[in-house]
Image (tube, rainbow, N blue to C red):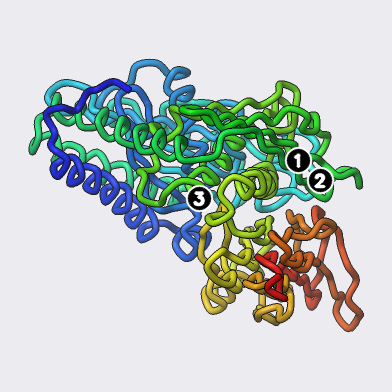
Amino acid sequence: MTGRGRSFDPITLEVLRNALEATAQEMGATLKLTSFSPNIKERMDASCAIFDARAQLVAQAEHVPVHLGSMLKAVGPTLEAVGRLEPGDVVIVNDPFVGGAHLPDITLIAPAFAEGGLLGYVAARAHHSDVGGMEPGSMPGRSGEIYQEGIVIPPVRLYARGELQADILRLVLANVRTAAERRGDLNAQLAALRIGERRLAELARRYGAPLLAEGFAAILDYAERRMLRRIAELPAGSYFAEDRLDDDGSGDEPVVIRLRVDVGRDRLTLDFAGSAPQRRGNINAVAPMTHSASFFALKILTDATIPANAGLLRPVEIRIPKGSFLDAQPPAAVCAGNTETTQRIADTVLRAFAQIAPERIPAASQGTMNLIGVGGIDPRSGRPYTYIETIAGGQGGRPGGPGMDGVQCNMTNTMNTPVEALEISYPLRVERYELREGSGGAGRHRGGHGVVRSLTVLGEEARVSLQSDRRRFAPYGLHGGADGARGRNWVREAGGDEREVPGKVSLTLRAGDTVGVETPGGGGWGSASGG
């Protein structure tokens, strides 16, 4: 701890902290309201955050956990790659091995200046519905290397001293299927950054830039102190957990995650030694993704009122074995590392934490994002379209009550695309959208039910990609609760019968064909008999 922030009394510091979180929230609202794609304007598959001058996460909105936790570890390396930024500069990046995400998650970062000095940085990350690659939507079911998943954008200046670098933008847009939509969403991200810069400048005028920097440090120190107090309350010892992904998309072999958690007096260590090596398929996760899922689980273990910033992680060590699929190295395929592997990391960490603080930890939620991507040519316009969505499922039963039905869980909290918006935007028809009754695991507090969602292709043929898991290994129950139901994917050709398809696959559908996703239920918590 630095001991800085002595000029801020507790009330003023809390006012400042809430002002920063409100700024991140306003950035997100601006992004949502000005975006072009349904994936952002309807689902809010985007996140915004604020960093200090040392690229430490100071404040975030309650956006998408998989984005926010990974930005915590990715903004610093991105800034190191581009060097000193000037007023008006904006950096763009989606390179997973620097920016810490998968390719569809494009991040824009801008510096915020006041009184002639650097205050910090504002960042906006958004999942773009297409960034090129072998399949529409850039989430292929069975990619084997990063180059198949889309255009890789290293950290570069999209704006330099306020001037658009048009050649960079042209290069990006020339490699995607839906260029106008991508341009609109990038402009929405830029608008979010401008809001963030403006609000930080206002805070600097109110407090003065030096005092504001001191306040940033004090907010991080406060989170660290709260985390240290929480660690001291936990029972010391070593705790072990294991879980697995169904497969990596290239074969049938399960992919194991192993974890040891060591609780000391003032230190918490998460060690993933023994986890599976890097895979041929696309479930590999870059290290910031592993940090992101661990960060999420730590928030559940601790206290919702502890600020979610870099200070919270100071007393925590996360060890990721080199060569494992939890620390992917180029040219690994990584698109499902975000959507599927982070969910299983979170499940594994929470399973260990359930031994430490059973009164706080729920049973496993659905453990997958059930991502579906559909693309082709829209007969109404003659232009390419790309639809992308993650589908809700069952939440795990909780110590204090049942799991919720049909919600996004753990590493994503995006909304669904409303049926009307989907059918207006794409040549698709929603045939079914309903709860999957009986899919929640039984228990004293049952798991939440999953959902059934099916789409019929109306136009010409379309390519469909599915990224899903928990089709072989069910979401676990806790303390005698039953497992939740496994998920299921199927296709029904026009006039034909349903046939089951793998959890990770890309295939062609023709007009009148239907694809369906039945999502997992959450595990039950506690014995149904009360014993």
Q: Which element is circle 3 on?
A: helix
Query: Is residue 394 shown above or below 359?
Result: below
Look at the image and tell me whether residue 249 can be seen: yes
Residue drawn at x 67%, y 36% as measured from the top left: 285
| Badge 1 density bin: few <14, some 14–19, many ≥20, Cα 10 Å | many
- Mark 2 or 1, nearer chain start: 2
The residue indicated by pointer 2 is 142
Q: Is residue 405 left or right of residue 44?
A: right
Q: Which residue type does callout 3 highlight?
A: Ile
User: Could you tell me residue 157's position as x and y percent?
Assistant: 41, 27
The residue indicated by pointer 3 is 300
Residue drawn at x 14%, y 34% as measured from the top left: 8
Q: Quadrant of the N terminus?
A: top left
Q: Which mark is residue 105?
A: none
Q: CA distance from mark 2 to mark 3?
A: 33 Å
User: Could you tell me residue 123's position as x and y percent?
Assistant: 38, 38
- Mark 3 or 1, nearer chain start: 1
The residue indicated by pointer 1 is 282
Q: Is residue 257 left or right of residue 177?
A: right
- Mark 2 or 3, nearer chain start: 2
User: Could you tell me residue 460's position as x and y percent?
Assistant: 75, 69
| Badge 2 density bin: few <14, some 14–19, many ≥20, Cα 10 Å | many
Residues at discs 3 and 1 in contact (Cβ within 8 Å): no
Look at the image and tell me whether residue 373 can be seen: no
Q: Quadrant of the C terminus?
A: bottom right
Residues at discs 2 and 1 in contact (Cβ within 8 Å): yes
Q: Is residue 368 left or right of residue 216?
A: right
Residue mark closest to the camera, 2 vs 3 = 3
